[in-house]
Image (cartoon, coloured by chain):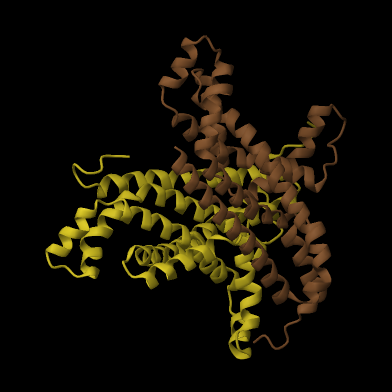
Amino acid sequence: MFTNFDFDVIRRSLAYLFFDGMTFTLTLTSLATFGGIVFGTLLAMMRLSGFWLLSRIAGLYVDLMRSLPLVLVIFWFYFLVPYIGQWLTGASRPIRVGAFASSLVTFTLFEAAYFSEIMRAGIQSISRGQPAAAQALGLTYGQTMRYVVLPQAFRNMLPVLLTQTIVLFQDTSLVYVLSIPDFLGAASKVAQRDGRLVEMYLFAALVYFAISCVASFGVRRLQARLAFAR
Amino acid sequence: MNYHWNWRVFWEPAPSGTGTYLDMLLSGLVLTIETALCAWIIALFFGAVIGVLRTLPSKTAGLIGFAYVEFFRNMPLLVQLFLWYFVLPELLPRASGLWLKQLPHAPFYTAAIGIGLFMSARVAEQTRAGISSLPRGQKLAATALGLTTAQTYRYVLLPMAFRIILPPLTSEFLSTIKNTSVALTIGLIELTAEARAMQEFSFQVFEAFTAATVLYLLINIVVVIVMRFVERGVAVPGYITGK
């Protein structure tokens, strides 16, 4: 079964896999998580706000994103972002957007919908007395959110946010459909060049598995610690 | 925006020779639904079995369930599909590997099984949550009545647990439908792939993707409405009222 298994192809491509591929994957994951949480929190605040128009828009956005497959959204933004760029900069033709920028926009906007649902649950988990007390102290809406509600919402939702980040980390592998060399894309390129599909895909699977396992173990420990502190 | 919209493109004949572009998209829609249903059957079956394993008193059963869930949850779906499609036939003995590779509709079977097993880990977690959310007294009462463990699950715990987890199961089913689009990487020509093909043939990018978007939204709406009826139909009076 493993008699003609070629470990050397993995060793030879390690530098490419990790310095190019994994760097792309991890940069995309962290930037998209950051952007997704910021935009997602804004969406959650819009959705919970008293203005029906704002909450309607946020609701529609979240529902739309959550009912579409990520692959389709990746294709959408790949073709749409040049036009948006043209519109924003007032250029005369669609601007050229690099693979990284395009996938960053896609993942930020797509994951924001999922992060917004988490943050909404987090904000709603704060007892109503707290914003009421903040208002009684004379804090504005912005201050109430900034100093009272959001810090606690983040803390309560931290394990769920991190779990979603692990999902996002796994989802970034889908940029493969645009032939972008993320970690899986890099592995696949080497696999096809050297005709070593078995070795490279098994190795890629192992790396994703190890990283996700360690990360979710960490989240579980964090969850246990947070449960005590509360 | 200097993009030339042409909504009539759907009624133009597609170069694939099987009818109009609309027919192309609809055949993709059918394949999406077929794949999702097959995957969902697999996910429900294995998910229920593993979910039950994780709630049994036996330590070994719990460990097997734990390992299963962690295995399928910690790898991207795309990687899992590649493992099933490209790696598995090479690792099998020569004859059966060759048979697998020459199987007609291989992308369809691979997608159904791969997505089914991937989703089964999630279904297992929901099943486990449903069973452990039941009051302890139900299991104790069943034991006191002299039911065996199998009977306890069959007649007491599972009927209740599945009713409780119906709403989260609905959203897992929706994820199954969405996940079928990942299978375009192994050559399954489902809805997203057809939209992409239409974009490549006709250059009408946004019409093609808008149509796919609308079709996905329609599937979602239909599933949500149907499941609402199912939920109402199976609700136990006085126990779970609505959501």
**Residue closer to the observer: A95 or A55:** A55
Residue A178 falls left or right of residue B35: right
Which percent across, then down, holds residue B136? 24, 54
Asked which quadrant contains residue B15, the reply is: bottom right
Which percent across, then down, holds residue A87? 79, 29
Above or below residue A66? Residue B127 is: below
For the question of whether residue B8 can be seen, the reply is: no
**Chain B: colour as depicted:** yellow
**Chain A: colour as depicted:** brown
Who's the residue at 58% across and 31% down the image?
Answer: A41
Which percent across, then down, holds residue A215? 60, 55
Residue B112 falls left or right of residue A7: left
The outermost residue toward the left is: B145
Q: Quadrant of the C terminus of chain A?
A: top left
Who's the residue at 36% across and 67% down the image?
Answer: B53
Who's the residue at 72% across and 40% down the image?
Answer: A105
For the question of whether residue A155 can be seen, the reply is: yes
**Residue closer to the observer: B178 or B122:** B122
Q: Quadrant of the N terminus of chain A?
A: bottom right
Count of numbered badges drawn on the protein: 0
**Residue closer to the observer: B33 or B27:** B33
Which percent across, then down, holds residue B182? 61, 58
